[in-house]
Image (spheres, helix red, strand yellow):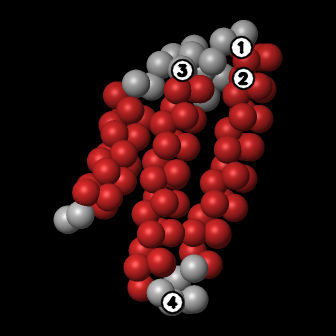
């Protein structure tokens, strides 16, 4: 495994571990999720450059588009929960309560 591949796979693993273990605030969960998406994007872009194929070059752009949509939906949820509950702590959110 090259050092470049190792760094991006370790960034992905660190993002997943942060998402798993540090779930106190919604903003920190969204940042960890964006970190994993960024490492996936860079890994797919390097993979497309390594194979020098035009068929693989659309996958990173599609992933980046989905990541932007996911980020905007996450920020909208963050604003909505901050307005209704007054905080972004995940312990205060009860999904069974209307």
Q: Tell whether label 4 touches label 2 (CB within 8 Å).
A: no
Q: Is residue 60 left or right of residue 66?
A: left
Placement of the N terminus among the 4 image quadrants: bottom left
Residue designated by label 4: 53
Query: Of helix, strand and loop, which one carries label 1?
Result: helix
Give residue 76's position: percent from left, percent from top: 77, 35
Closest to the observer, 36 or 86: 36
Give residue 75's position: percent from left, percent from top: 72, 34
Q: Tell whether label 2 touches label 1 (CB within 8 Å).
A: yes
Residue designated by label 2: 81
Residue designated by label 3: 25
- Disc 1 versus disc 4: distance between alpha carbons? 49 Å
Residue designated by label 1: 85
Closest to the observer, 16 or 45: 45
Q: Tell whether label 3 touches label 4 (CB within 8 Å).
A: no
- Disc 2 versus disc 4: distance between alpha carbons? 44 Å
Camera-side mark, 2 or 4 = 4
Give residue 9's position: percent from left, percent from top: 32, 54
Placement of the C terminus among the 4 image quadrants: top right
Camera-side mark, 1 or 4 = 4
């Amino acid at each position: 495994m090259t050092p470049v591949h190792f760094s991006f796979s370790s960034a992905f693993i660190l993002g997943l571990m942060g998402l798993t273990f540090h779930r106190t605030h919604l903003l920190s969960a969204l940042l960890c999720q964006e970190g994993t998406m960024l490492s996936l994007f860079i890994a797919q872009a390097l993979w497309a450059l390594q194979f020098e194929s035009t068929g693989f070059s659309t996958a990173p752009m599609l992933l980046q588009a989905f990541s932007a949509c996911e980020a905007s939906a996450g920020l909208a949820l963050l604003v909505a929960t901050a307005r209704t509950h007054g905080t972004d702590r995940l312990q205060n959110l009860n999904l069974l309560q209307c």
